[in-house]
Amino acid sequence: MEKLIVEGGRQLSGEVRISGAKNAALPLIAATLLAPGKHTLRNVPDLRDTRTFMRLMGELGVTSERNGNTVTLDSTQLVHAEVSYDLVKTMRASVLVLGPLVARLGRARVSLPGGCAIGARPINFHIMGLEALGVSCRLENGYVDAEISTPLQGNVIYFDIPSVTATENLLMAAVLAEGTTVLKNVAREPEIGNLIDMLNGMGAEIEGKDSGRLTIKGVTSLRPADCRIIPDRIEAGTYLMAIAATGGNGMVTHCNPSHLPSLLEKLRAVGLIVVETKDTISINWPEGDTNSYRKLRSVDIKTMPYPGYPTDLQAQFMALMTISSDVSMVNETIFENRFMHVAELRRMGADIKVDGHSAVVSGKGMRGLNGAPVMATDLRASSSLVVAGLAATGRTEITRIYHLERGYENLVEKLTGLGARVWKESV
Ligand code: EPU
């Protein structure tokens, strides 16, 4: 096991290149199950989660090869339709193969994910939607056994809450159903748009991209895909906040600024100058502001489905607010237990009070945190500890960094490129 050491207090500056989005890569890899043949996916990040997903695909019979960030997958021969608990317990997104397997093979057996560090995270919407398309789903011995006796039938499906992976699962099932499916109140995250583009490129007929209502005219077969993964908006946001927290100026490149509407407005509200081009975002402190201890204004956030403020950037923003100049409120509306980072940030000197889904953060000013040994609890909580560690005075040691490795490609190299002093050590 390894830990991450962060020597804080150094201003970050320069450019960092953003990788492909983990949460787009996973559904797009799953979608290759829909059409036999050789698929090409480009800009696929090399992460613990993408590697686990490729292993899962291998167990189903899909052979794959990685050449840099280009991955080819051959899904001609599927040999299994079952995903074991061993895989699902390490990566909940494994459930994304349920829809495509049923559409291609007429059956699937996937272990039910349990709760996780950030909440209960049920999959009832996935199952309700598949049942509406004619799939019989039995829950037995911790597995979902999904099966059809007649071809999938299009239907109108309404989601109580916009769910990202349920929308993706249902899209992947409905593209090969007979007739038309209408999905209402769906999630609109850019990763879903990436999946829609891939499926339409394979011959699917999906309308309504980026809206809350998708219409899918079923087709009888699809052809292999050649598709590019969109840039990781959460990685981009994390680096922007890391730079800001150290009082630095810098730029993220190879990203899509239009995928971060709420964060960029929040960064402007804290007092930074944010400049967007087609594929870069830079943040700068106002000119003439040469204080070595700069001031961040305190700003409230409330997490919401896209285009609202993303829950996956909540912990990092909270870390930023711990060194702001006043009091701010962080309201988490998506997951019921996504404040695990609070206890760790407090160990670094942060003043945060939690009441249910709200946290009140009393900023300590720039350099108001001190390095400390802390523990990573989930992917985004861990990245907030990195942001805090970079801003803090002294040394922060983060254990359980396998969480970070799930979602941040070449983290140490990228931070080092920005001038940070970070390295891994064996525990
Ligand atoms: N929900 C249900 N029933 C369902 C599905 C969802 O009640 O059947 C609830 C959830 O419990 C939650 C809300 O609906 O309260 C929204 O959850 P959603 O289904 O959208 O989350 P997800 O699809 O499981 C994806 C990302 C998460 C990200 C969320 C929210 C992937 C692989 N995962 O999860 O990413 O936080 O959307 O944006 O796309 C991460 O990358 O660190 C991460 C956790």
Image: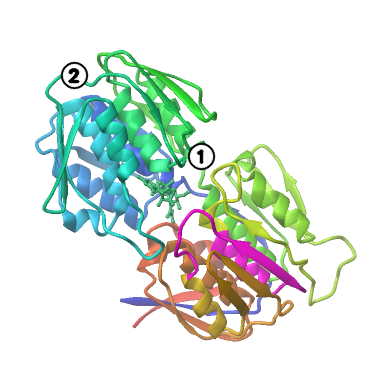
Residue that sits furthest to the right in the current view: 288
What's the residue type where badge 1 is placed?
Glu
The secondary structure type at the circle numbered 1 is: loop
Left or right: 54 with respect to 205?
A: left
Circle count = 2
Whole-angstrom CA distance, mark 2 to mark 1, is 29 Å
Q: Residue at x 43, y 63 (%)?
A: 379
Q: Amino acid at mark 2?
A: Pro
Left or right, 314 with respect to 2, comes to right
Residue found 39% across the figure and 61% down from its top: 119
Provide residue 188's location: percent of width, then percent of height. Answer: 51, 36
Question: Can you give x and y, in whole percent of width and height, for residue 36 in the image?
Answer: 21, 25
Q: Which mark is residue 136?
A: none
Q: Position of residue 289 (x, y in %)?
A: 87, 67
* Vertical placement of residue 172 versus 419, above or below: above
Does residue 332 show up magenta in the picture? yes
Q: Is mark 2 within 8 Å of ligand 1?
A: no
Nearest to viewer (mark 2 / mark 1)? 2
- Disc 1 CB within 8 Å of nearest ligand 1 atom: yes
Q: In the rendered structure, does residue 347 fall within the stretch colored magenta?
A: no
Q: Residues within 10 Å of mark 1 (few under 14, many from 20)?
A: many
Q: Position of residue 322 (x, y in %)?
A: 65, 74
Foreground residue among 219 and 125: 125
- Label 2 element class: loop
Tell me the number on the disc at residue 151: 2
Residue name at image x 66 percent, y 48 percent: 262
The image quarter in which residue 327 lies: bottom right
Segment colored magenta: 314-339
Mark 2 or 1, nearer chain start? 2
The quarter of the rendered structure image containing the N terminus is bottom left
Q: Is residue 239 left or right of residue 134?
A: right
Tell me the tag on residue 189: 1
